[in-house]
Image (cartoon, rainbow, N blue to C red):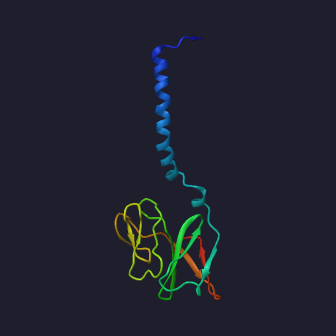
């Protein structure tokens, strides 16, 4: 076994270590999209988010579902719910306080705009916010369930 390491091999090793370290961060970032966190893969349990009496027309009811920020809103006689993750790059969309009548939800990252119903109306988002399945019980409880609406 040769214990003498040439200068070329030594310098190659010295250069390889920081190069591999520098490549690690971007690879880790790409990895989160290729292999999403378990919370996105596990089917979440149904969750009570409030009652019809608490939900005023066109006002947001914010909640977390499966560790993802979401909101529900009563539009006419229908309750809809969706995630607040922008469909452009996944930033959390800002929700104005009070009535959302005539207002837009805005993504602070790149200015994406959504209607109160979660429909993309401006900026770079390619599609509406992800809708969630909602069930309103006879007693008025609002339940968010697994799957999209």
One can see residue 9 in this view: yes
Q: Quadrant of residue 140?
A: bottom right
For the point 49% across and 23% down, the residue is 13
Q: Quadrant of the N terminus?
A: top right
For the point 45% across and 17% down, the residue is 8
Measured as percent of width and height from the top left, residue 36 is found at 54, 54
Measured as percent of width and height from the top left, residue 81 is found at 52, 76
One can see residue 142 in this view: no
For the point 46% across and 20% down, the residue is 11
- Give the vertical position of 133 relative to 124 (above or below): below
Residue positioned most to the front? 97
- Give the vertical position of 112 relative to 144 (above or below): above
- Give the vertical position of 75 relative to 25 (above or below): below
Taking 25 as reference, is 127 left or right? left
Taking 87 as reference, is 41 left or right? right
Measured as percent of width and height from the top left, residue 76 is found at 47, 88
- Give the vertical position of 12 relative to 83 (above or below): above
Measured as percent of width and height from the top left, residue 132 is found at 53, 73
Q: Tally the numbered discs.
A: 0
For the point 38% across and 81% down, the residue is 102
Taking 127 as reference, is 39 left or right? right
């Amino acid at each position: 076994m040769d214990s003498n390491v040439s200068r070329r091999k030594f310098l190659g090793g010295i250069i390889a270590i920081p190069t591999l370290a520098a490549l690690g961060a971007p690879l880790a970032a790409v990895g989160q999209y290729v292999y999403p966190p378990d919370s996105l893969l596990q089917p979440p349990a149904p969750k009570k988010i409030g009652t019809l009496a608490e939900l005023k027309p066109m006002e947001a009811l914010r909640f977390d579902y499966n560790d993802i920020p979401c909101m529900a809103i009563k539009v006419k006689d229908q309750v809809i719910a969706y995630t607040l993750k922008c469909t452009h790059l996944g930033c959390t969309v800002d929700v104005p306080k009070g009535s959302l009548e005539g207002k837009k939800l805005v993504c602070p990252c790149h200015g994406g705009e959504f209607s109160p119903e979660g429909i993309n109306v401006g900026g770079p988002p390619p599609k509406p916010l992800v809708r969630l399945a909602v069930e309103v019980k006879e007693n008025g409880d609002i339940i968010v369930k697994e799957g999209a609406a």
